[in-house]
Image (spheres, rainbow, N blue to C red):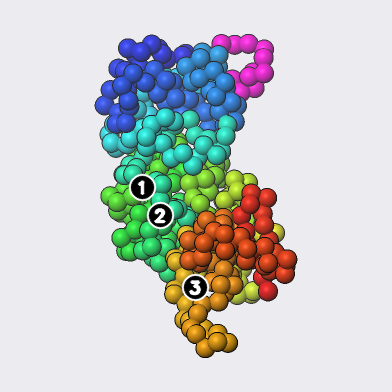
Amino acid sequence: MTLPDLSMDAARAALRGIEGVAVDTEQDTYARVVWNVIAEPGDGAAGALISAIGPVEALRLAATPSDDDWSAARERWAPRLRPDAVRGALDGARRSRARLVVPGDPAWPSRVDDLGVHAPVALWVRGRTEGQDAPSVAIVGARAATPYGEGVTADLSAELGGSGVSIVSGAAYGIDGAAHRAALSAGARTVAFLAGGVDRAYPRGHEGLLERIADTGAVWSETPCGSSPTKWRFLSRNRLIAAMADAVVVVEAGWRSGSLNTAAHAATLGRALGAVPGPITSAASAGCHRILREYGGVCVTSAEDVREMIGCSPEPEPQACAASIGGEGRTDDTTRLFDALSTRVARGVDDIARRSGLSAAQVQTHLGLAHLEGRAVREEDGAWRAVRG
């Protein structure tokens, strides 16, 4: 097991020509590239060690034989700790002009930090990294999609994208590809996460689609350039799709679909989770029905359902004035309050006031009455939602 030279001069030389490397961070950045090569995606032992002592010292400890808590992990890392493997990954990045992004970089997608010790040690990207603060929805589903599934996906993706929501998916055939294509057609930003290196189009038939995504959005991977997708890497990739989104929507999925793995990550991370219902006789929708029943997913029938899941529904349309007993046109304050509330997404008093046009004090008063009537509930964080009638 040979540890590469980790000096600052050696790190600068090794990273020469790699886009995205900040000055005076080369040593830590190079160490993260080495970790990126030797550890599989989501390796919690690597994440915990790096978090505890930093990537450089973590590598030195990993390369030092010892009978300690890291012994089992060393056995996983040792076969890959070869300087030629690190050089190969960097050469592939130069050829494909992939950018390296590490924690602390302005381009680092901070949402993935929610994965804790299972967060990536580094990421590779082709395309544009700006716009990451925009609302984001992951749309995923079966590769063997039906025309129904692809049609629903196209409608959701185009309408959400047209309203400023970024669309995240995995660039696979079927639902993923339909989501990306519809977003591109709507002029929206779309982001793809690959299970292999960003220099290798997968599936091969989506090479052109991935180029189009990189032109206006981004193609990401946490595996180094030259890496092949594997079953494990697909499953591990799914946690990044879930982490990068404010909500995950599964459009079509079989009973054991990999999309359920993405849904499970979304639930673990506290992301909003929804599924599109299908015919009860359709095996292609059995996984979606399972999400609705077992995961408490939101039943998604329109883009507005998804916008409500992430708390960015459009402002309510001005309500027609109702005639009061005195004959003067007025808008009933209680109606305005409930127009601003949601049964699915809890909202704060200020947000409800903004949506309803009432003052915060008026909102507090009407919420108190609605609570006494059992028509509204207050969550532990102080936000409110309506009770289904």
Which residue is rendered at x = 56% and y = 72% of the image? 333
* Residues at discs 1 and 2 in contact (Cβ within 8 Å): yes
- Look at the numbered disc 3 and give the secondary structure of its residue: helix
Q: Which mark is residue 148?
A: 3
Magenta-colored stretch includes residue 150: no
Q: Position of residue 180 (x, y in %)?
A: 39, 58
Magenta-colored span: 64-74
Residue under label 1, please give it.
131
Tag 3 or tag 2, which sits nearer the N-term? 3
Q: Residues within 10 Å of mark 2 (few under 14, many from 20)?
A: many
Residue lying furthest front in this view? 326
Tag 3 or tag 1, which sits nearer the N-term? 1
Q: Position of residue 388 (x, y in %)?
A: 67, 70
Direction from residue 364 to residue 152 in the image, left or right: left
Q: Position of residue 179 (x, y in %)?
A: 42, 61
Q: Amino acid at mark 2?
A: Ser
Q: Which mark is residue 166?
A: 2
